[in-house]
Each structure stands twice: as C-alpha cells, then as structure tokens.
Image: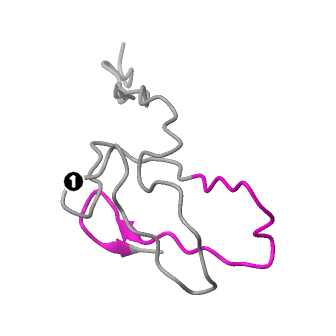
Amino acid sequence: MAGRMTGSDVKAVFITADTQALDADGISTAAAVGNNAALTIGGALASGGSCTFDSGRVVTILSAGDDSAKSFTVVGTDVKGYLKR
C-alpha cells in the first residue's frame, strides 16, 4: 500500500529494580546530632568515609528522639558525577 508506514518507532526500556534491603545503619551509625553538624559516614555500606551505589537510592533519616527542629541535607552525586543536594 502506498503511504503505509512499516516498522515501529517503539523502543524497549529496561528498568532494574532496587533490590537493596533497608539498612538502618547503612550510611551512618547512631550518633548525637547538633544543628548544622555533619554525620560521619561510617555505616555498614560505607567504605573510606563514603558510600557508592550502583543506582539511585532513597535516603531515610531515622531518629530515636524528636529531631523535628533540626534540618538535614543529604549531599551526593548523580549518576553523571554532578553534585546534588
């Protein structure tokens, strides 16, 4: 047929699921935190003061007390190495 398109412009996309289990002390272990103070990266998933993952991660800060008056900033790099906050 004249004018009939053949083939497809649909491309397959493969997504790898994050299979890393929650690790409450993966990045940092229990520590007293002051306002604007840095946490030490030395948890179970850390090596040499940093954590390197093969895909993006959701970072959760757990607390045994009321830290609602404190602010936390998570700093790292994206998959291309650009600094993110």
Indicate left or right for 30 with 51 as reference.
Answer: right
| Residue 54 position in % (x across, y down) | 27, 42
Q: What span is colored magenta in the figure?
A: 60-83
* Residue 30 lies within the magenta run: no
* Residue 68 lies within the magenta run: yes
| Residue 16 position in % (x across, y down) | 37, 27
Residue closest to the eye, 14 or 17 = 17
Residue 36 in which image quadrant: bottom right
Indicate left or right for 62 with 20 as reference.
Answer: right
Q: Residue furthest top?
A: 1
Residue closest to the eye, 16 or 74 = 74
Q: What residue is drawn where x is 55% and y is 75%?
A: 73
Indicate left or right for 70 with 30 as reference.
Answer: right
**15 over 35 or under it: above or below:** above
Question: What residue is pinned by disc 1?
Answer: 47
| Residue 10 position in % (x across, y down) | 38, 27
Q: What residue is drawn where x is 50% and y is 69%?
A: 74
